[in-house]
Each structure stands twice: as structure tokens, then as C-alpha cells.
Amino acid sequence: MSASYRQPGVVLTDRRFTVPLDHADPAGETIELYAREVVASDKGHQELPWLVYLQGGPGFGANRFVGRQAWLGRALKEFRVLLLDQRGTGHSTPANRQTLPLRGGPAPQADYLAHFRADAIVRDCELIRREVTGGAPWTVLGQSFGGFCAVNYLSTAPEGLAAALITGGLPSLDAHADDVYRAAYPRVERKVTAHYARYPRDVERARRIADHLLSHDVVLPNGYRLTVEAFQSLGILLGGSEGSHRLHFLLEQAFVRTPHGPALSDAFQEEVQALLSYAGHPLYALVHEAIYGQDERPTAWAAERVRAEFPQFDAAKALAGDGPLLFTGECVYPWMFETDPALRPLRETAELLAARTDWPRLYDPARLAANEVPVAAAVYHDDMYVDTAHSLETARAIRGLRTWVTNEFEHDGVRAGGPRVLDRLLALTRDEA
């Protein structure tokens, strides 16, 4: 039974759906999906077109907005919105260290998680669309990985779409995971260089923390083992609109004086463990590289392997000289399944996914070249997470797609500049811009 309730200016309704785990076997095992319907309180009885939101990730549930935050207020002027928790996230049959053992050992767990990529998410959308809209097409808004899903949607079920809006999420149609990370490390280095230019004292602060971690065994209060590589991975912050400032504030509170000498402060450790733990979104770590798998080559821990091609990211070498410590970006490394207590029980499952060689193709270039769905995409010129060159190449491959290339926002532009970003994309799909 659906339950409705109110927040300022909106009416919310909980929606639940049953879908096949494997859409190739519709009579087989099923899983549950959860979505939150949102409508403006003064439009609750109106017949409105639908907009379904696909969150970035993979592995994150839809935003839990309060009222009309971010882009939602603009959307509610003309849409009824469905905030979908993609399979395995939020309230949608969660997949984590607590639930996955119900599948059995690592091999059946890996087989199960092979059904949690963009292709399955889109087929979920098509099943629930018929129930939600009565069969009418809807508009999809895809942020980051949600944009990857939108491109799969255009490849496999364009008849379900009235329009597609993509923010920071145009994937390469054919790049292997190696290619993705080979393009990523230079972008990350540029972001780190820009951060140190803004906050020059952070160069020494970061070196001091890294030096401390190389000579001390630091275990955070939640059991996370803070290695120097884990500390470097805090560079993922630098892809967000406020990320450089957040990293700076974190570094400046790292040490306190104690009777036994300088130590990493409780405040620093508390914030770091919240930033590094995958307890709330383990699917991100488990299937992150799998979202790039499309051929017979395994992803095989691409971020770790390709990192070896960029020795400037080696902390020990940086500390041996007088250069700055480089942070890393949006990467999942095998050591995370040792350092993070939320991931340790899933290490063998992750290894099996990394070795998998039977990933189906996600995108259909021929169908995209013949696309008839109105599509608009925000491409962030300095995006740290999604390569701009890859995005623009894909934009050219999708017939009729209109891009808005901007350096006004970082990757999280749909949050930071939500109403303006959504307004611009809607205008582009309607030839109003």
C-alpha cells in the first residue's frame, strides 16, 4: 500500500515495485524497487507529465530532498517526479555485506551483482513506467552514472522516453576501463595542482600527514585502516563544487599535541572515516569498474594497474623528494577491500567481478546515430569524474543531442546550480535556448 505525506510545498508518496532480478528470465527470482513520488502540493490532482530521476553512482539511492531543494523545485513546476532508488540501493533490496551472504559464497554473490548495471536499471524503469504512467513516455534526468543509464535507455528503449536530460554523465561508448583511468589521472593531477595553488600551505600539511601514516599504523574509530593510499583517495572531494575548500578545512585540523607527541586529531579521524567508508554505498566499490565492462576483457582493477603508469602519484617517492603529495580521484582499488571493514567480507566477490569477461554491450551506436528523442546534456569543461573529450565524442555520436559545455559548475552542477541547470537543459530539448 502506498503511503503519502507532506513536506513544505510538496506531497510525497512511497511507491514499491517488483521486478525480475534477471530480465532475461522474467519468471525467475524477483527483487523489490522503491521510489518516492513527488508532486507540488498545489498540483496534486493535475494530470502532469512524469520525470524520473536517476542518481549518480553507481550505488547511491536517490536524493532525500526536503521540500523543493536543488533542481526539484524547478522540475515540480511542470512534472510529477519519481525519485528512484536504483536496484541494490536505498530501500530497493539493498546489496551489502549484511545481505549478500544470503546469496551464498563469493561466486553466487558475484553472479547476483552482475545484474546491477545500467542495462538492468533501464529495464527496471521500463517495467515500472508502464505502471506509473499508464504507458506514456516520460522524461529521464540522469546525473553522472544516471547519465550513463540514460544513454543505455536511448540505445535500448527510446520509445519509453519523451526526452532525456543528462548532467555530467555522457559516457564513452566504447572505452575500456583502462582508457577511462588513463584519461582520469592527468585530470586529477590538474585538480590537485589547482588546489595547492589556492591553498599553498596544504602542500606541507598533506606531506606531514602522509609521512605520519607511512610510519604509524592508524586505525580509525570505525575500524578503517588509514594508510597513505587511503589518505590520498580523499582527493575524490576535488571533483565537487566545494570539494577543494572541504579538503583544506580537513587538512588544517589534522594534528593535535598530546602527552605522547603530535597525533591525528579525533575531529580529523571522525571526518575522514565518514568520507572513506563504503558502509552506506558498497555497490559503488563493488561494481564501479564493471560499469565500463563491454567486451571479453576483464576490468581487472584498471585504476590500480593504470596508476602504475603515473609514478608521480607514488606517495613514498613524493616524500623522498620535495614535491607535493598528489591525491587520487574517483578510483576503486583492491586494497579498499582490506582497509574498509564494510568491504572486507566482500573481497573475494570483488575479485570475481574484476575477473569477469562476459559483460554485454551497453550502448548501440547505430541506434544512437538514428536517435529521435530530444536529448540535452550539460558537459562540465573541467569535470574531474567524467572525461570531457569522451563526453563530447559521444555527444557527436547521438543524433540531435544538444550540449551545454560550461566551466561554471563542477561535476555536481545539478545540485549546486540545480534550477538553472535543469532550466537550460529543458530549453535545449525544446529549441528555446
Image (tube, helix red, strand yellow):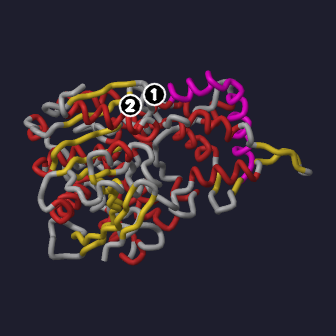
Classify mark 1: residues with Cα within 10 Å, few (<14), some (14-19) or many (20+): few
Q: Residue at x 33, y 30 (%)?
A: 379
Quadrant of the rendering where the C terminus is positioned: top left
Report the number of numbered marks. Answer: 2
The residue that label 1 is drawn on is 186
Closer to us: 32 or 117: 32
Q: Amino acid at mark 2?
A: Ala
Q: Are marks 1 and 2 in contact (CB under 8 Å)?
A: yes
| Residue 311, image x, y percentages | 53, 31
The residue that label 2 is drawn on is 183
| Residue 271, image x, y percentages | 65, 50
| Residue 188, image x, y percentages | 49, 31
Q: CA distance from mark 1 to mark 2?
A: 6 Å
Q: Main secondary structure of the magenta part?
A: helix
Displayed quadrant of residue 235: top right
Q: Residue at x 38, y 47 (%)?
A: 72
Per the image, label 2 sits on a secondary structure element best described as: helix
Q: Residue at x 70, y 45 (%)?
A: 213
> Does 25 sit left or right of 89 as displayed?
left
Closer to us: 39 or 109: 39
Q: Residue at x 56, y 59 (%)?
A: 340
Quadrant of the rendering where the N terminus is positioned: bottom left
Q: Amino acid at mark 1?
A: Pro
Closer to us: 286 or 37: 37
Asked whether 210 falls inside the magenta stretch, the response is yes
Q: Is residue 355 visible to us here?
A: no
Q: Which residues are magenta?
A: 189-217
Displayed quadrant of residue 429: top left
Q: Is residue 221 visible to us here?
A: yes
